[in-house]
Image (tube, helix red, strand yellow):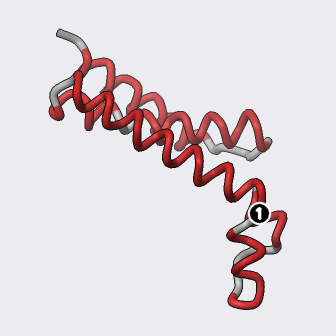
Amino acid sequence: MGLEQQGGIHLSNFLSVLFSPLILLGILFYGLATGLWFIVLSRLPLSLAYPLQSLAYAIGIVAAWYFFGESVPLNRWIGVAVIVIGAAIIAAK
């Protein structure tokens, strides 16, 4: 949203994009996600935590559909289902 609001990123608007409130918020969220990832890695084995990270792809598609009204074709919904089923299999003990 931040880049769309700025009309993309170009050499001429680099600083205004960098200091855009939405871009700064995105950078903050990225930092928080990195900290959360460190916490997850301190509590779960990598062989479990890393495959579960694939759920981010599924969440991204759902968010694009729900929040941004993007049209999501059937093959992507099938992909989401495969990812979720795979994550459930990996997480099962």
Work out whether residue 85 or residue 34 is closer to the camera in this orientation and state it: 34
Q: Quadrant of residue 65?
A: top right
Image coords of residue 91 (percent x, y): 26, 18
Work out whether residue 82 or residue 36 is closer to the camera in this orientation and state it: 36
| Residue under the image location 17 percent in, 34 percent down | 46
Looking at this view, name the residue that lies furthest to the bottom.
12
Image coords of residue 72 (percent x, y): 66, 43
On the rendered image, what quadrant is the N terminus found in? bottom right
| Residue under the image location 47 percent in, 42 percent down | 57
| Residue under the image location 54 percent in, 34 percent down | 59
Work out whether residue 1 or residue 65 is closer to the camera in this orientation and state it: 1
Q: In which quarter of the image is residue 44?
A: top left
53 lies left or right of 79: left
Tell me: residue 90, above or below residue 59.
Answer: above
Q: Name the residue under label 1.
A: 20
Tag 1's secondary structure? loop
| Residue under the image location 68 percent in, 43 percent down | 64
Amino acid type for the residue under numbered disc 1: Ser
Tell me: residue 81, above or below residue 64.
Answer: above
Image coords of residue 31 (percent x, y): 49, 47
58 lies left or right of 41: right
45 lies left or right of 6: left
- How packed mark 1 is, by other alpha carbons closer than 10 Å (few <14, some 14-19, many 20 or more), is some
Tell me: residue 6, above or below residue 34.
Answer: below
Work out whether residue 19 or residue 67 is closer to the camera in this orientation and state it: 19
Image coords of residue 45 (percent x, y): 16, 27
